[in-house]
Amino acid sequence: MRRTSPMSMSCQIVLHLLFFIASLFSTHASSLCSKDGSVVRNISEIPSGNYGRDGLSHITIAGAVAHGMKEVEVWLHTFAPGARTPIHRHSCEEVFVVLKGAGTLLLGSSSSNSPGTPLEFKIHANSTFTVPINDPHQVWNTNEHEDLQVFVIISRPPIKSFIYKDWSMPHVAAKLKYPIFWDEDCWDSPKDEL
């Protein structure tokens, strides 16, 4: 007969307790503003929306508002052919992993008065790219026949975005968007911990 060590038994009890506590805070997945304390979630059951952005499907896989994340936030974006983000910047790091499709990353400069003429980078399935802090950028599905799907990881959520009308707009004129589109309906102003 196999004996369970006291340490192993303690770990099991703690894990069961954590799962029980998490289940107390877990709510129905179809509620957009639910504080989801689930340890494991099915992405296909997480609410998605376009949030007034035609051709976009956004899912917050793990986030500050919906899940209490403090250091990172994870999104799944699907862009229909021709869809794109607005030209924008934010004071956080951002990593993209292209899951399917192809498109273009447009990347402007934060070191001059305006973004200027952006650099163009072709992106495709199995590619990854990063956007430096405060560099204006735009992701665009330039493929006419297939959706572009990207996995996005950002630091320091919830983010404050600054939206540009065009690439010549001065940085100081960019419009603050806070909270970000998908957090608007569920927003409770968090306390700044810094």
Image: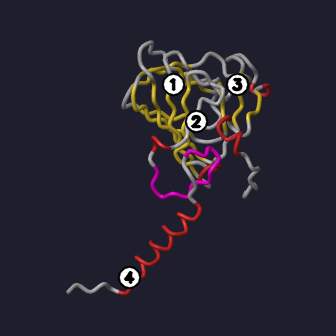
- The secondary element bearing badge 3 is classed as loop
Q: Which mark is nearer the camera, 2 or 4?
A: 4
- Crowding at label 3, few (<14), some or many (≥20) Cα neighbours within 10 Å? few
Quickly name the residue at label 2: 132
Chain part drawn in magenta:
30-41
- The secondary element bearing badge 1 is classed as strand
Residue type at tag 3: Ser
- The secondary element bearing badge 4 is classed as helix
Quickly name the residue at label 1: 79
Q: Is residue 34 magenta?
A: yes
- Secondary structure mainly formed by the magenta segment: loop
Q: Name the one closer to the observer, 97 or 14.
A: 14
The image quadrant of residue 171 is top right
18 sits left or right of 52 in the view: left
Residue 112: numbered disc: 3
Q: Is residue 177 above or below residue 156?
A: above
Residue type at tag 1: Phe
Quickly name the residue at label 4: 9
Q: Position of residue 128 (x, y in %)?
A: 43, 33
Q: Name the one closer to the observer, 18 or 175.
A: 18
